Amino acid sequence: MTDKRRPYSSVIVDGLTQTPSRAMLRAVGFDDDDFKKPQIGIASTWSMVTPCNMHINQLADHAEKGANTSGAKAVVFNTITVSDGISMGTPGMRYSLVSREVICDSIETVVAGQGFDGVITIGGCDKNMPACVMAMLRLDRPSVFVYGGTIKPGAERRDIVSVFEAVGQRAAGTIDDNQLIAVEKTAIPGPGSCGGMYTANTMASAIEALGLSLPNSSAQEAVSSDKKEDCERAGAAVMRMIETDLKPSDIVSKESFENAITVVIALGGSTNAVLHLLAMAQCAGIEVTLKDFTTIGERVPVLADVKPSGKYLMSELIEIGGIQPLMKMLLDRGLLHGDVMTCTGKTMAENLAAVPPYPESQDIVRAFENPVKEDSHLRILYGNLAPEGAVAKISGKEGLSFTGNARCFNSEEEALSAILDGKVGKGSVIVIRYEGPKGGPGMREMLSPTSAIMGAGLGKEVALITDGRFSGGSHGFVIGHVTPEAATGGAIGLLRDGDVVTIDAKTNALTVDLSDAELAARKASWKMEKTTPKRGVLAKYARLVSSASLGAVTDGD
């Protein structure tokens, strides 16, 4: 009789013809009984490349224990990771978004190639997290995502963004070399993802809201008993999903993606969530567009006063209950779809039913009557500079509109040098182009220049637009994902120094004060001003990648 729990592994290990397969597996620890069990692949993103992932081998061991104790046979395997924080501001950053596609492809390859019946993915840094989920959605086998957890605060509540902004402060002369090195040495105390509502914590929260991780998985410190228990529970959860044939396609829907977008907005999350949620939806075959962020953003306020634009760290949010009470608030307000299924086998409403409210004394998460911002901080802008859309992260603290004269740079390095040398004056709109998915290639994050602007005290005086993207740690008047990008002839590549650029978060517009005729004339004489690689992974990526407005995916329709 065929074991319905083993639709994939049975092909690998059952019968006379698979004797060689079993012989190979015995060498890695299988015994007779293991061949009769569902196999769960555990995709570990462990690496000593970055503190975000340096502990994930230990978490994988706990996930393996949970799966094996529940009657499965777990198999741990690794994939790569690239550190945004380490490569930021260097040519290496071009590989960051590329790594999302490589990681997704590698997990799909191993799971499908080895015939695993279920999957646990464990991610800890910005790109490997959506990559894990993208692979889960492609494979559509019982699966759970586990977040590696947030880092503990550094000295004086410092984090990685403190270091980047200290560079701007040193350039501006407001701190000395000793103060700079003190920040450098004390900001990153150990394992875990960057400690504010930056991209890692944003995506962990979005994935939990999507229903693909266990309740509260997104709100645990990396070094904690809670995180170890989360991993063991994930092993047991996947085994239950195998028993009931519960797959990602039974969980994700347009409504669950709307839940994820809602939670990201309420938390004041990263602009990268737009890019990643679009990509994840594409893998699931669900239509999510930039317009969904606008529609949802009109009714959902920012409630969490968390970094980078707010005061508090993720660890402090964890102390008061994490994101579950916030999700319960949103559900009770009618802003979440409570009837969507989750990886627990229960609906979102069932998971949240017994969640207690936040303590009355806390001020990290605001009441609906006193929001941080009455509508979304994530603004999708359109206009003659971005006919296919751009993504802005505008908290309102720097204002809601900005008009200034363009200062054009054809690379991040050129712009950063000008900022640090004091060559960018008040009232400027810094334009960084040829940094899009194709033009980079790789769509680098601009944390270095945005942090330099803030560190120099120019956050309210200078704006920045780019066809690249931003770190979750970026804040200020910054607009990214400008599409079409410069490398494909987009209007951002036609700008000249002195052109008057207007950013308006009230009307959701990004425009330059030029006539259609002038833009057409400039385009007629435009030529690509950057040489891109002809070989290797960057060249391959540039040939395949879609527009940022579609998620910058490499396997699109």
Image (cartoon, rainbow, N blue to C red):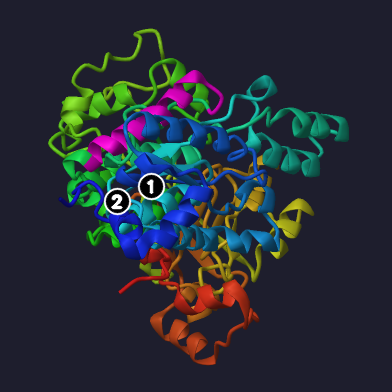
Camera-nearest residue between 192 and 136: 136
367 left or right, relative to 45: left
**Amino acid type of the residue that numbered disc 1 sits on in the rendered structure:** Leu
Give residue 341's position: percent from left, percent from top.
18, 39
Q: Which residue sits at x=32%, y=54%?
A: 9
Report the label total. 2
Give residue 463's position: percent from left, percent from top.
56, 53
Identify the secondary structure beneath mark 2.
helix
Is residue 41 inside the magenta stretch?
no
The relative height of residue 503 versus residue 123 in the rendered view (above or below) is below
Image quadrant assignment for residue 554: bottom left
| Residue that mark 1 sits on | 378
Give residue 302's position: percent from left, percent from top.
35, 34
Residue contact at pointers 2 and 1, CB within 8 angstroms: yes
Camera-nearest residue between 466 and 97: 97
Circle 2: is it few (<14), some (14-19), or many (20+) Cα within 10 Å? many
Can residue 290 be seen here?
Answer: no
Residue 293 badge: 2
Camera-nearest residue between 49 and 349: 49
Identify the secondary structure beneath mark 1.
strand
316 left or right, relative to 235: right
Q: Which residue sits at x=54%, y=59%?
A: 99
Bounds of the magenta segment: 222-242
Closer to the N terminus: mark 2 or mark 1? 2
